[in-house]
Amino acid sequence: MSNLYRHIPAVNKVLADPQIIQVSQGLSSVEVTAVVRSTLDQLRQEIAAREEAIPQQEIMSRIALELETSKKRKFQPVINATGVLLHTNLGRAPLPQVALERLRALGEGYFNLELDLRSGARGSRYASVARLFNLLLAAELGPSDTTSSLDTVIVNNNAGAVLVALKALTAGQEVIVSRGQLVEIGGGFRVPDVMAASGCQLKEVGTTNRTRVTDYAAAITEQTKAILLVHPSNYAMIGFTESTPREELAQLAQERGILLIEDIGSGAFEPFAEPLVSSALKHSHIVTYSGDKLFGGPQAGIISGRKDLVDIIKRDPLLRALRIDKLSLIALEAVLELHLNKDYKELPLCAMAQLDPSHVKQRAEAWQSQLGPGLQGEVVAAESTMGGGSLPGETIASWALALQSPKLSSAELHEWLRRRNPPIMGRIVQDRVLLDPRTVLDSQDESVLAILRGGLK
């Protein structure tokens, strides 16, 4: 039996093998050693089960494959040719160049994260970014009593924003929500779960497809603290439906002395039209929204609203547990400055959304002209989508290269593209793989062309 294991090399010999050294580039020595040990253990188990020796060449090939697989687990650039602008699996909004430069300039050293340079005392990490958000909102709202009493605080994501706002303002009391707005967002995270974690008491009203202002009014009791409006950011309901406008809910909340809290999810600012944060703030006391969706920045949850309420949220202990980290704040500050200066062309998300379809078609035709052996394709009309739970049901006219291969099925071709370096992500439509240039950065065109030109080998 011992002869069955004769081809299994010692770990140190594997680590010294030129093939293994080559394939290990980019991995730490600790990772490489762990992969080698784990693979050799698996091979011993296979030999014991099969009672059959494994040739040394196969052993080395298996180790090399596992090392390549380990590399794939690391973060790396991916070419997004899906046509989905805010692709959650691919990091949502690409950051603008100015944000990347600011991250490098401040992230490589120390900076005044929580230091007031005027007084030398400890400051707030939220102050600078909150001030810029307040200025941006005031510019969109115009002079009003709302803007003079407005404030903002930032946490790590929008689910966290909803959670801390509800906990600080409504814990132990009733919060009324339409049944049609008890949505589930990405990763199985549900609004009722967020509410339960906040300590408030969920009170459902209406039906899945119809909720009237009278349903809200009838549900209000002495224990009611707020009405929660949840924007259906990741789905669209059509047909026999009815929902209550926020204006009516704001009036009801004022009459009954309760709060109107609104989660608008994506949270649009110019140049996007809906769901505008400024429109929500004209009626709702507190509005929560995301930084990495239509705003085009890093992951963040923003809470804007009446200053006295934001002050209460700032004092809640949960805020520290959910606080945004320094790198996200740096990027967010840079993106805010672009919005304030209306430099929308510098925001990759805005630039992609506004690309002329004729320009997208030209790029798709350039890709088609370079197809290598084993690849066939035609340029077809397509529809890009915003994605990331933003603007459900809305599409952007686009063009795509529809790829096929006589050698591979559409699923196999999709996988082949994903396994390239860099990986290319497309989408399968009618048994073809569509590659939409709208979501591919101009700087990535050469990589796409090189992969397509090489064809199937």
Image: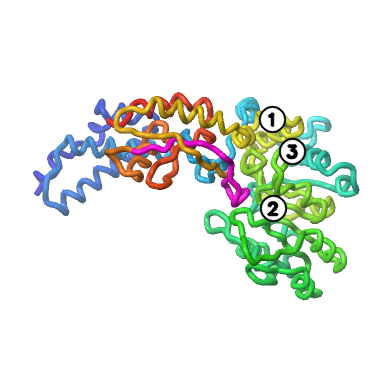
Badge 3 local density, few (<14 within 10 Å), some, or many (20+)?
many
Q: Is residue 343 visible?
A: yes
- Quadrant containing the C terminus is top left
Q: Amino acid at mark 3?
A: Val
Q: Is residue 334 above or below residue 315?
A: above
Q: Which residue is mark 3?
A: 129
Label 2 is placed on what type of residue? Ile
Residue 27 picture location, percent across and down: 39, 33
x, y percent for residue 335? 68, 34
Q: Is residue 58 above or below residue 260?
A: above
Disc nearest the viewer among 3 and 2: 2
Measured in 3D between alpha carbons, the distance from the residue under mark 3 to the one under mark 1, in whole angstroms, is: 15 Å
- The quarter holding residue 179 reads bottom right
Q: Earlier in the sequence, mark 3 or mark 2?
A: 3
Q: Are marks 3 and 1 in contact (CB under 8 Å)?
A: no
Which range is magenta? 387-404
Q: Label 1, on which residue?
A: 111
How many C-alpha atoms fall within 10 Å of the one at disc 1: few (<14), some, or many (≥20)?
Answer: few
Quote the CA–CA distance across marks 3 and 2.
20 Å
Q: Which residue is mark 2?
A: 264
Disc 2 crowd rating (10 Å Cα; few below 14, some 14-19, many 20+) is many
**Displayed quadrant of residue 415:** top left
**Residue 394 sits inside the magenta stretch:** yes
Say whether marks 3 and 2 touch (CB < 8 Å). Answer: no
* Of residues 229 and 412, the one drawn nearer to the viewer in this rendering: 412
Q: Measuring from the top left, give residue 297's x and y in whole percent.
A: 64, 38
Asked which secondary structure carries label 3, the reply is helix
Amino acid found under the numbered disc labelled 1: Phe
